[in-house]
């Protein structure tokens, strides 16, 4: 399903659900009376609960302005900046990109007077910039972020935090040494749905965690990174040599500049681009520091356009028992040619229920194990059947219990501005108050490190071990 169709469908469903909810408010109250603590005030099956805006945004108003600059004025950078400017007290100061056309686009969006440059270092020398949004290619994340913090700038860095694990340790060190706020831009960490799922799991409302699965399927050219290339793309309009940076030197190739996610030299493939979101959600909900082993498989099934990353990838992660959670397994899947229309899901399964998160909804199913295991005695002779029934009834005497609701649904409030907005609110609050942020460099490395293990596993066709505490790749096993 494309984004417009998904949005329209979601809006229609929400409108219908809201009308249903208002009409049956009394039933909702009755159902909630039998719900566990974490599900209190939750309506019964088919009636969504609209989550309250539980966070205070008062810190974003009537405070000093935070002046930002954008480095990497592509689609993600523009989206980030437009969202950041929705937060009170944020001012756009300058922009940087290596393609002339994007610099012109920045002026179209934020004013002809906006200073623009192809050299990000010029922005870092400016005293009127407090923070930068780093929306460059993955292979530039560490260098630009480190340089920015050394120059006294706070950093909002797009996911995955780094292309290589060693670079992640560099960012952890630089953030600590400089005291600057560094936040990774995997916005689900700030989602109301994630916060609610965490509360429900912690309360034990779905029992003990045993399994998790996450899906991020797509069915469109844009979803498969077949981005449009401007007609004037050339070595004259693009600073190709600077773009290559630490990557291998190559002749000018517009595909590698504008469709960089398709190439290992600049990106991290499906795992780094999408699985980081899924692991971020899982780690926020469970409190996990990460898996100890990853196995990945897949291939290029449809988009045979010269890319050297798969268009379908599946991974299995082994999570050990820790103080935060029991031992469990996670599977992830992403398919860029999903004829079913695309799908997004994070599902966490417990012994007595599950949590299913979509882009804009959370559904909780509860199915408690009955105390009595049941009997399979039709193949017993009569005398043995009678004896078995007698003993069974002694162990499990009949005890009638109320049958409560088995499904609970949550949805965003009508005035919710989105996870990315909430993520920027949290970032700027940390900047203003010098307080810990919601997705720092350590969290970011623990989310992207296992996905790099997955890419190694895919290439080597062997499982790869990961140390989630020390954040180190231990190698193939």
Image (tube, rainbow, N blue to C red):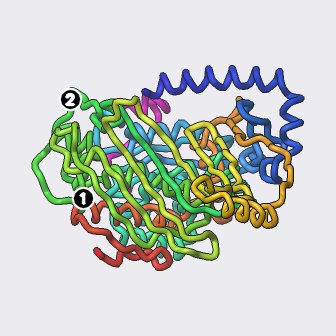
Disc 2 element: loop
Rendered position, 118 above or below 163: above
Q: Which quadrant does the N terminus fall into?
A: top left
Outermost left residue: 251
- Sequence-wise, which precedes: disc 2 or disc 1? 2
Disc 1 element: loop
State the residue at coordinates (27%, 34%). 226
Q: Is disc 2 in contact with disc 1, using a CB cutoff of under 8 Å?
A: no
Rendered position, 83 above or below 465: above
Query: Magenta stretch: residue 164 in it?
Result: no
Question: In the picture provided, is 253 more to the left or to the right than 346?
Answer: left
User: Residue 292 lies in what quarter of the image?
Assistant: bottom left
State the residue at coordinates (25%, 51%). 243
- Residue 281 image position (x, y, % from top left): 55, 54
| Disc assigned to residue 245 | 1
| Disc assigned to residue 477 | none
- Residue 476 image position (x, y, % from top left): 28, 74
Q: Residues within 10 Å of mark 1 (few under 14, many from 20)?
A: few
Residue 147 visible to the viewer: no
- Residue 118 image position (x, y, % from top left): 32, 47
Residue 430 visible to the viewer: yes
Query: Magenta stretch: residue 112 in it?
Result: yes
Between 135 and 130, the one lying in front of the other is 135
Q: Residues within 10 Å of mark 2 (few under 14, many from 20)?
A: few
State the residue at coordinates (65%, 63%). 208
| Distance from Cα at disc 2 to Cα at disc 1 | 22 Å
- The mark tally for this picture is 2
State the residue at coordinates (44%, 42%). 77
Q: Which quadrant does the C terminus fall into?
A: bottom left
Look at mark 2 in the image and give the residue it sits on: 232
User: Residue 295 lies in what quarter of the image?
Assistant: bottom left
Q: Which residues are magenta?
A: 103-121
């Amino acid at each position: 399903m494309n984004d417009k169709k998904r949005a329209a469908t979601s809006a229609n469903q929400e409108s219908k659900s809201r009308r249903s909810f208002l009409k049956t408010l009394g039933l909702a109250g009755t159902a909630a009376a039998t719900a566990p603590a974490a599900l209190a005030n939750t309506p019964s099956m088919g009636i969504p609960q609209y989550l309250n805006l539980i966070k205070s945004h008062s810190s974003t108003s009537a405070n000093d302005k935070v002046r930002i600059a954008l480095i990497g004025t592509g689609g993600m950078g523009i989206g980030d900046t437009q969202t950041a400017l929705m937060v009170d007290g944020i001012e756009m100061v300058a922009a940087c990109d290596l393609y002339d056309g994007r610099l012109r686009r920045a002026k179209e969006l934020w004013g002809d007077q906006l200073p623009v440059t192809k050299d990000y270092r010029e922005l870092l020398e400016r005293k009127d910039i407090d923070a930068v949004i780093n929306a460059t290619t993955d292979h530039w994340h560490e260098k630009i972020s480190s340089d920015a913090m050394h120059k006294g700038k706070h950093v909002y860095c797009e996911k995955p935090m780094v292309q290589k694990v060693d670079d992640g340790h560099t960012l952890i060190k630089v953030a600590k040494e400089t005291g600057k706020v560094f936040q990774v831009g995997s916005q689900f960490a700030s989602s109301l749905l994630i916060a609610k799922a965490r509360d429900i799991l912690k309360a034990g409302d779905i029992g003990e965690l045993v399994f998790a699965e996450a899906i991020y399927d797509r069915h469109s050219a844009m979803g498969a990174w077949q981005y449009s290339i401007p007609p004037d793309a050339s070595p004259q309009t693009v600073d190709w040599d600077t773009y290559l940076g630490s990557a291998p030197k190559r002749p000018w190739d517009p595909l590698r500049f504008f469709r960089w996610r398709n190439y290992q030299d600049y990106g991290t493939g499906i795992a780094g681009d999408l699985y980081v979101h899924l692991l971020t959600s899982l780690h926020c909900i469970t409190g996990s520091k990460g898996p100890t082993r990853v196995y990945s498989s897949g291939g290029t099934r449809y988009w045979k356009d010269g890319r050297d990353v798969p268009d379908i990838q599946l991974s299995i992660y082994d999570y050990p028992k820790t103080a935060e959670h029991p031992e469990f397994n996670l599977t992830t899947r992403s398919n860029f040619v999903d004829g079913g229309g695309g799908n997004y899901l994070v599902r966490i399964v417990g012994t007595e229920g599950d949590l299913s998160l979509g882009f804009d909804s959370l559904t909780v199913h509860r199915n408690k194990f009955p105390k009595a295991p049941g009997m399979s005695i039709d193949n017993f002779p009569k005398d043995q059947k009678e004896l078995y029934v007698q003993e069974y009834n002694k162990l499990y005497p009949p005890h009638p219990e109320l049958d409560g609701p088995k499904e609970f649904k949550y949805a965003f409030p009508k005035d919710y501005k989105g996870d990315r907005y909430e993520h920027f609110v949290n970032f700027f609050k940390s900047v203003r108050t010098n307080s810990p942020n919601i997705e720092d460099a350590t969290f970011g490395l623990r989310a992207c490190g296992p996905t790099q293990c997955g890419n190694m596993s895919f290439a080597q066709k062997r499982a790869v071990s990961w140390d989630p505490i020390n954040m180190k790749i231990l190698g193939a096993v």
